Image (cartoon, rainbow, N blue to C red):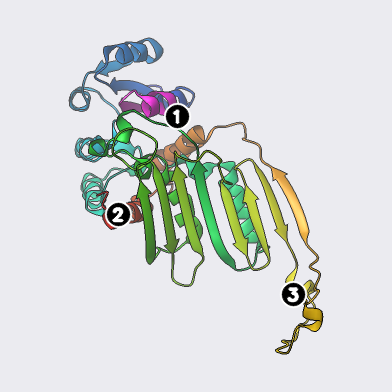
Amino acid sequence: MSDGRLAVGIFGLGRSGWDIHANALADHDGFAVTAVADPVEERRQEARERFGCETFADAEALLETADVDVIVVATPSHTHVPLTIKALQAGRHVVAEKPMAASVAEMDEMVAAAEQAGRVLTCYQPRRLDPDFAFVQEVLASGRLGEIMLLRRTSHRFTRRSDWQTLRKYDGGELSNTVPHLLDQVLLLLGEEPSDLFADLRHTVGLGDAEDHVKLCLRAEGGPLAEIESSLGMAIPQPAWQISGTTGALVGDGTTFTLRWFDPNSLVSLELDEGPAVGRRYGNGETIDWQQEVRTLGRGNRSQALRYYDRLESTLRDGAAVFVTPASVRRQIKVIENARLQTGYA
């Protein structure tokens, strides 16, 4: 663009395309929405009035006509792969909404298209920038929890959904809608690709035929057990985060956290006693000098969406490393694909 901003075209002006991407890009000095594609005329008119941009009824027409640097693919999930590949082949950088793909094979097709075109391919995973995720990383890095045994990440609510995202033919379900955010965080915390997976997928309270209750248990070699629960059928939500280690624990709802730990050097030496319990008591009477901290997190002055696009701008202008690499997303897709195959939801 003549004013130096990167020109963006948005495929799809629905909940994600409009409420997340268009709103963030409207407030970002490094980008300008110059073209959009959506089959609904009212949405196209709304975009014309807000951005003064070109509008198209379909994505292919935008690619053929509009001069844009970046395409945001925010269409229904089952269209992400073909539209992303078309945009890459047309020479555009691409930000694909999650789920980026439904299979590892599709991910590999997209990566190959990006490499052949010499364009940046990335996925919108803004939850990497959440304050609670940063705090969890900080606590784990401090070592106060000792060796981690259990890492539990949940998203619980009770909602009877009835829209297109409840249908498997559109790649709907919790594995596509919410789990990618949670799984992305957990895999980053684990650091290694899990070798073991147990999956429980159920269709419970909503309409459609896709899973609305997900339980995943992951374990990397020698690492902690990681549990992910994403459910629309939970009347009483459990904590969003629960992490237990050999010297402490962290529990929180995403805003307020309780951290409890002790200094292992403060413990006295114990001796194993194989004889009858003295006084028939349980335990040995040891007292742990627990320390506790309650932390309430702020949200910051700049949204996760804006900070995500800050990083994308640095990549496109300055050659900075891609914030969300296709390789990191491929790990997610592998777990999700295997969970579907294991449970018959493929």
Residue receiving disc 2: 343
Residue receiving disc 3: 282
Instruction: Tell me which label, 3 or 1, sits earlier in the chain.
Output: 1
Residue 86 in percent (x, y) is at 19, 36
- Dot 1 crowding, Cα within 10 Å, few <14, some 14–19, many 20+: some
- Dot 2 crowding, Cα within 10 Å, few <14, some 14–19, many 20+: few
In this view of the protein, which residue sits in the foreground, 246 or 107? 246
Quadrant of residue 319 within the rendered picture: top left
Marks 3,1: beta carbons within 8 A: no
Residue 73's place in the image compared with 128, above or below, is above
C-alpha separation, residue under disc 2 versus residue under disc 1: 44 Å
Q: Residue at x 43, y 42 (%)?
A: 125
Residue 128 in percent (x, y) is at 49, 45
- Amino acid on which disc 3 is placed: Tyr
C-alpha separation, residue under disc 3 versus residue under disc 1: 64 Å
Look at the image and give the residue range highlighted in magenta: 4-21
- Dot 3 crowding, Cα within 10 Å, few <14, some 14–19, many 20+: few
Query: SS class of the residue under badge 3?
Result: loop
Residue 334's place in the image compared with 205, above or below, is below
Residue receiving disc 1: 30
- Amino acid on which disc 2 is placed: Thr
Marks 2,1: beta carbons within 8 A: no
